Amino acid sequence: MQEILTGLIVALDVVALYLLLPDVKRRFLLSLWTALLHMIFPIIGYSVGSWMVSILSQWSSLISSILLFFIGLQLILSTKNRQIIAIPIVILAITASLDTFSVSVSFGMLNLQKYLFIISAGIWTFILSYISLHLAKNRFPIKGDTLKWIAGISLITISMITLVDSLNNS
């Protein structure tokens, strides 16, 4: 269940970004690229995370908690920096998907279900990014800052739960 919820959380970050882009012409293609990258980056992240577990098995839960905490904090702080620039769809999709790498490193370190998270992140990201791009085109009144706060607080909460669990199991 945590994997499905985190797949949704990483998709919310994309929604927050894409709600700020009212003039995207190829919304379906951008949503598809972003969803695919939200699946590719976690595969790489899980591999790195699993590798790190073999090296840092005693510290993996603490490191994972710290990574998730700072990713969540970065999402919250990014609401202050709101620059909109015209960039190619592929670059925009990569930029919107890079955070899934660091989240999946943490999940790889925790040995959570890789494919469940990857499929969840891809499906949620495609659906929500496509919807948010259509809403942005229609000048939907909700801005991305609220969603970034929700995603950031959710990741910080997961990091705290992971930290408490690891301390209780020690």
Image (cartoon, rainbow, N blue to C red):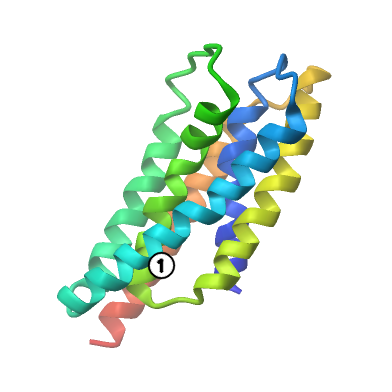
Q: Which percent across, then down, holds residue 109?
A: 32, 71
> Which residue corresponds to mark 1?
107
Left or right placement of residue 53 versus residue 137 in this view: left
Which image quarter holds the N terminus?
bottom right
Which residue is drawn at the image coordinates 48% and 49% (left, top)?
A: 153
Which residue is drawn at the image coordinates 23% and 69% (left, top)?
A: 52
Q: Which percent across, then down, holds residue 169?
A: 29, 87
Left or right placement of residue 159 versus residue 114 in this view: left
Q: Residue furthest right?
A: 138
Which residue is drawn at the image coordinates 41% and 56% (left, top)?
A: 103
**In what element is the residue under mark 1?**
helix
State whether residue 160 appears in this view: no
Using the image, determine if residue 123 lies above or below residue 149: below
Q: Which percent across, then down, holds residue 113?
A: 51, 76
Which image quarter holds the C terminus?
bottom left
Q: Residues within 10 Å of mark 1 (few under 14, many from 20)?
A: many
Left or right placement of residue 105 versus residue 152 in this view: left
Q: Residue 46, located in which quarter of the rendered image?
A: bottom left
State whether residue 96 appears in this view: yes
Using the image, determine if residue 110 lies above or below residue 86: below
Q: Residue 81, located in which quarter of the rendered image?
A: top left
Disc 1 residue type?
Phe
Which residue is drawn at the image coordinates 64% and 62% (left, top)?
A: 120
Using the image, determine if residue 100 lies above or below residue 104: above
Q: Which percent across, then down, holds residue 53?
A: 25, 75
Using the image, determine if residue 146 lies above or below residue 99: above
